[in-house]
Amino acid sequence: MNQALHEPIEVLTKFQHGQIVPLRIRWNDRVYNVEKITGNWFHRDGDFKEYFFAALVTGNRLVEIHLDTRDMRWTLDRIDEE
């Protein structure tokens, strides 16, 4: 079941060759390793960007997350619940 959440999360991120690479997500006191980024895109809002990622994480779950550069906060937008 795919559930829309829009909840704040913590993300361990690597910045490499001008790219943002999410490595690990912490949500509800659980840690999920990012196994594969399946898609990424961005949205510009004036001077700011929001970077979006679709990823396969631990437990073969699909998530959608985004980073808002306005406040440098990460959000879990959707998760494929078990």
Image (cartoon, grey):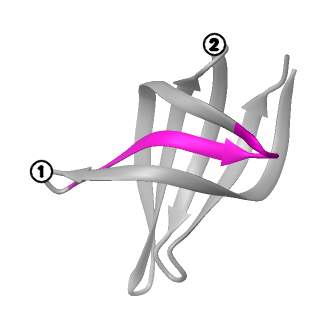
Quadrant location of the N terminus?
top right
Assign a secondary structure to mark 1.
loop
Q: Residue furthest top?
A: 60
Quadrant location of the C terminus?
top right
Q: What whole-number distance in Å separates the C-alpha atoms at marks 1 and 2?
A: 27 Å
Which quadrant of the figure has residue 71?
bottom right
Which quadrant of the figure has residue 74?
bottom right
Q: Nearer the viewer, residue 55 or 41?
A: 55
| Residues in magenta, as a range | 19-30
Q: Which residue is mark 2?
A: 60
Residue 6, horizontal then vertical, whole percent:
78, 56
Q: Main secondary structure of the magenta part?
A: strand
Q: Nearer the viewer, residue 46 or 40?
A: 40
Q: Residue furthest left?
A: 17
Q: Is residue 6 magenta?
A: no
Which amino acid type is marked by label 2?
A: Asn
Q: Say which label, 1 or 2, has the lower sequence index.
A: 1
Q: Nearer the viewer, residue 2 or 35?
A: 35
Q: Is residue 73 left or right of residue 27?
A: left
Q: Which residue is mark 1?
A: 17
Residue 15, horizontal then vertical, whole percent:
25, 55
Which amino acid type is marked by label 1?
A: His
Q: Nearer the viewer, residue 41 or 29?
A: 29
Q: Does residue 56 lie above or below 76 as drawn?
A: above
Residue 69, horizontal then vertical, whole percent:
46, 75
The residue shown at (63%, 13%) is 60
